Amino acid sequence: MFFNTTKSTYLFLFLTTIFFLSSCKQTSQIPVQEKKEKEIVIEKKDTIILTAADQTGIYIPKILNKNIGIVANQTSIINKISKFNPDITQIHLVDYLHNSTKINVKKVFAPEHGFRGKADAGEKIKDGIDTKTGLPIISLYGKNKKPSKKQLEDIDLMIFDIQDVGARFYTYISTLHYVMEACAENNIPLLVLDRPNPNAHYVDGPMLETEHKSFIGMHKVPVVYGMTIGEYGKMINGEKWLKNEIQCDLTVIPNKNYTHNSSYSLPVKPSPNLPNDTSINLYPSLCFFEGTNVSVGRGTSKQFQVVGSPFHHLENHKYSFTPKPNEGAKYPKHENKECFGYDLSSEKKLDQLSLKWLIEFYNAHKEHSKEKVFFTSFFTKLAGTKLLQEQIENGLSEEEIRTTWQKDLEEFKKVRAKYLLYE
């Protein structure tokens, strides 16, 4: 009896031990598997492109206990990334710094389209107060493109953080020029938080001629210059393009895990009429139409993805759209008129500036339109030269026109190379 009881006890203990060891083995595997999964997440995050603004640990120590001015708009965001949380949350740079007890943000300087990025292209932007933070907003678009001495008198350091798209006629680089000049004149250091340029993968287009300098083209660079805004700022400084060849006390915080060939989708549209990656890629090629009687889709949901005109209803212009007032286009070109042309929203990504649509519409105008004017005076400002219009009017092909750019482009690339931060 004792033997049977003992035997049963041993059998029970043996089976319990096997079950316990099996359970422990299974339990021990759970954290190992979780750890492995987390390591994969971390590895992926180590390859994510980080803007300068995302890297708070690098620039926050440089601005503690200082009175700060910030040049910013809706693109000035910080992507907060946790190693143990796959979700990415966004916070505006101004909000983040304003909430810090050791950083005194004094005022915000806003470029074209305003601090929240809602205004039309060319619309006058007024000074005001940011309703969220209570900070004063000073417009740098309109008559006051450059911060004045009075506007900077209580500033120890300026921060510039605005998303560029890499086209000469996009005015944020002109705003950068004037901010650098004002900082240099008033002995104020400037910290540029760099951001990727979605059109940095190529350099192309006609070079600006000095006599056609304007706010949509201030420097002797091609239409597409293939540099981030931080690299561009270094070039402005290094080439002494500021007034009287003065130089700014400039620091650029670079992006991380980024090259000029990196694929980068902007998390926030940089202006009201560049709503997505396709519009941004087409922008350098289609913006020339702003100096013609052809619409680029302002007043539609496909801005800079469609082109058309009421005057060019040709057999191959089967697509049509009708511009109507909307955000960023209160008075669109050809408002409430049906425009015939192309939908380019599925166009393959461009790696060079394209003139084919511009030349086609000009030829259609010349042969079929009763309208006298195709090119307006604004076209020369956009092109930065009178030559491009003359070449198109004289019937040169796209390849023939492109050939005339090459010498200038090669010379520019030599200048550009001195200031690159990325491959």
Image (cartoon, rainbow, N blue to C red):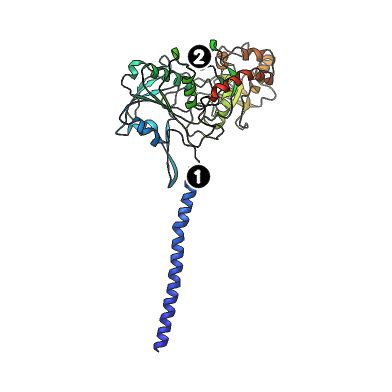
Q: Is residue 421 left or right of residue 319?
A: left
Write down the quadrant of residue 74 in the picture.
top left
Element at label 1: helix
The location of residue 69, given as percent across then percent down, is: 36, 24
- In the image, residue 197 sits, relative to residue 372, either above or below, namely below
Q: Residues within 10 Å of mark 2 (few under 14, many from 20)?
A: some
- Number of marks in the image? 2
N-term mark: 2 or 1:
1
Q: Which residue was labeled with disc 1?
A: 44
- Whether residue 132 can be seen here: no
Type of amino acid under label 1: Lys
Residue 214: assigned label: 2
Q: For residue 177, say whether it is visible.
A: yes
Q: In the rendering, at what x and y percent does residue 7 appear?
A: 43, 83
Residue 36: image x %, image y %? 48, 53
Q: Name the secondary structure under disc 2.
A: loop
Residue 416 image position (x, y, % from top left): 54, 23
Estimate the spatial distance between the alpha carbons at disc 2 and disc 1, rounded to whole Å: 44 Å
